[in-house]
Amino acid sequence: MTRPSAPDAASVAATVQSLAVLLHAGLAPTRAWEHLARSGDETARAVRSAEAEGGSVPTVLASQGEAWSQIGIAWQVATTVGAPLAASLRSLAEALRDAHQARDDVRTALAEPRTTARLIGWLPLVALALSAALGFDPIPALSHPIGLTCMVLGGALMVLTWRWTAALVAHAQPGDAIPGLGAEIVAIALCGGVSIPQAIAVAENAARMPVDRATRDVLDLSRSAGAPAVELLRADAAARRQSARTEGRLRAATLSGRLLLPLGVCTLPAFLLLGVAPMLLSVLTTTPVML
């Protein structure tokens, strides 16, 4: 039995936004989850089922995929310090939308180079079929030791091309984590009225990792300037999401040039081995030797 795939960030953001609206309207969290479960949301159903058995919301959300896991961290922080859940979830929904938009931008930019790479990757096999269509019988040539060697080497180069291309495309894809999540989590903790050291401790306990250096620098700036830490943290988180979006577009833009590497190193030699070499061998093996 296959496990259902985790919902994407866009659907999670829509659910979180609905949840924030329900909470802002005065519904208790349990009632809000119940209304969402009745509307057909699978995550809300899982939360209600776990709550009925004494489970916790963050634990359930952690099992629903990366996006929900990050919402679970925020939920745990907000409930621990008594921060307003509606406002906290609304902020996280906006962060999820920004992160999802960044991934959409990168996927759109990658569409053309990925399609080009796929087409070029099949070029050696197309050349082999074309040689057969032109009247050259590649079967006797490929059964020859030299032809067999060309076929093995060409096939290996094609596999290497596909794997190399897939690795380059995967490297250009953005991660699932929300940029600036640490700053958002600490801002939620501060909204509960706790001190900065306590907010850091709560955030680190919920996320099970230390608060990053950039977030601590923003907190230091808040102390020295006497500026509101929450506003500075959320501005920093928004700036990091914008930076991640720009970096993703740049990675996608440079991918077209990087895809030329497997083309030159693997695809063209495979084209010669699988397309040109069989035609030459076919000519040599079928042409009688003149004495």
Image (cartoon, rainbow, N blue to C red):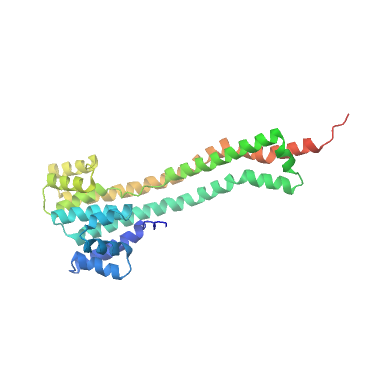
Farthest residue, direction top: 291
**Residue 247 picture location, percent across and down:** 38, 45
At x 30%, y 54%, the residue is 63
**Residue 214 picture location, percent across and down:** 24, 41
Image quadrant where residue 90 sits = bottom left
Report the front residue among 290 and 219.
290
Q: Is residue 226 visible?
A: no
**Residue 116 picture location, percent across and down:** 55, 48
Quadrant housing the C terminus: top right
At x 33%, y 68%, the residue is 40
Please give left or right for residue 172 compared with residue 149 in the image. Answer: left
Q: Is residue 204 visible?
A: yes
Farthest residue, direction right: 291
Q: From the viewer's perspective, is residue 231 above or below residue 269? A: below
Image quadrant where residue 219 sits = top left
Please give left or right for residue 195 compared with residue 140 in the image. Answer: left
**Residue 217 picture location, percent across and down:** 20, 41
Q: From the viewer's perspective, is residue 50 above or below residue 237? A: below
Q: From the viewer's perspective, is residue 12 above or below residue 110? A: below
